[in-house]
Amino acid sequence: MADRVGVDCRALGNINRNRGIGRYTANVVNGLVASAEGFEPVLFGYGDGPAPGLLDAAVFDRFEWRRLPGADDGSIYRGPRGHLELARAVNTSGVDLFHGIDHNMTPLLRCPSIITVHDLIPLVLRGPYLGPKSLLWMLSHRAACMRANRVIAVSECTRDDIVRIWKIPGDRIVVVPEGVSPGYQPVEGPLLEKGLERYGIKRPYFLYLGGFDPRKNIGNMLLAFKRFLPSDGEVTLVLCGDTGGYEEYLADEIEELGLEDSVLLPGFIDDDDLPALYSGALALVFVSVYEGFGLPLLEAMACGTPVLASDVSSIPGVAGDAALLVDPLDPAAIALGLSVLAGNPDARARLVEKGFERSSGFTWEKAVTSICGLYRDVLGGAT
């Protein structure tokens, strides 16, 4: 009889569904269900199933879905209530193992568990990230990890943070990097032009993809772009992502720098269109001051796009020598990097070649194989 493995799929139905955790969850589930590992997956999430488009169509008839009460309503009291609801659902389901993936994990499980930790941003950066709600879920997540049989870190940087801040022994933590989906490949010709036209993007342009909270360092990126911008203003900076809550800040910054005609904000980009946007860009500009992993780096590389990135947190470990790394707090250094990638074809070609090689080593198939190996270790009695 196959072992029943519960998988935390809350991120397929809450605010994280269009963020990195949602994509991580979907890729793990798709890989787990498609594998021949012999596990019986039981998925725990909100509503009657995941949000449309997140899981492969062939997956739907191959898993058991367990509906959790409610959803994350943003209340500080939702954390403790959510912990009880998740624990009750898992503890009465008969699963042999539970894999926690979303940030806000319950420490009240009775079965063996494995927990993925994506980052410790609130505890590393504090400031605007560490309020009463985030402190509560950080405390509960740590307690859950202390009880877990294994902890998965998505990068060496995250592993080091877990050891340093949470004091969890390093020998209980396994680094399993994220992967690049097969759809991230160079796009050319009419498909490329059609993808860019859909969002009103014209070449040449630099691309940013992600959030707009302070750690993403958008202010220094704009300062650097202003420094770099040729007098004819032909190059555009395209900032892609959900700007919710930051519209006024972005408008003020762009206006103050006189970049109204040089910065484009197309909003959220459908996953199917991302390869085209990556492929058409002069470079991906990813100068965040902190990342738990940084998947856009590898997605851009897989599409044949040079990468300009920060030399801090997890980014050097993920990018290796396949990106041009700069100090994210130095707009002059970022501007110089933009100039190199816009004006030096040889440098671009070297990074493109190295990027293909680097990104090919990160696949979801490899990640899921490692995760299934941990399932077997724990189910076989390893502590």
Image (cartoon, rainbow, N blue to C red):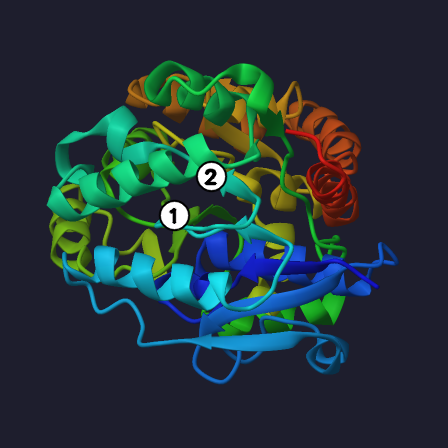
Given the image, on which type of amino acid does mark 2 rest?
Answer: His
Q: CA distance from mark 1 to mark 2?
A: 8 Å
Relative to 30, residue 310 above or below: above
Judged by depth in the image, the label closer to the viewer, 1 or 2, is 1
Q: Is residue 7 left or right of residue 370?
A: left
Please state the horizontal and vertical placement of residue 243, each as a whole percent of the image. Answer: 27, 59
Task: Give the residue displayed 73% in from the left and 83% down from the top.
Answer: 61
Relative to 286, residue 56 above or below: below
Please state the horizontal and vertical placement of residue 300, each as a whole percent of the image. Answer: 62, 44
Task: Give the residue displayed 66% in from the left and 18% down from the top.
Answer: 321
Whether residue 188 is visible to the viewer of this picture, yes or no, is: no
Residue annotated with mark 1: 103
Q: Is residue 316 left or right of residue 130?
A: right
Relative to 127, residue 132 above or below: below
Give the mark, 1 or 2, whose residue is nearer the N terminus: 1
Quarter of the image with the C terminus is top right
User: Considering depth in this image, is 316 or 378 the residue closer to the camera?
Assistant: 378
User: Considering depth in this image, is 265 or 156 the residue closer to the camera?
Assistant: 156
Given the image, on which type of amino acid does mark 1 rest?
Answer: His
Density class for disc 1 (Cα within 10 Å; few <14, some 14-19, many ≥20) is many
User: Considering depth in this image, is 271 or 165 the residue closer to the camera?
Assistant: 165
Please state the horizontal and vertical placement of residue 285, each as a whole percent of the image. Answer: 46, 37
Residue annotated with mark 2: 118
Tell me if label 1 and label 2 are in contact, CB under 8 Å: yes
Task: Give the residue displayed 43% in from the left and 17% down from the top.
Answer: 163
Please state the horizontal and vertical placement of residue 341, each as a whole percent of the image. Answer: 56, 30
Whether residue 299 is visible to the viewer of this picture, yes or no, is: yes
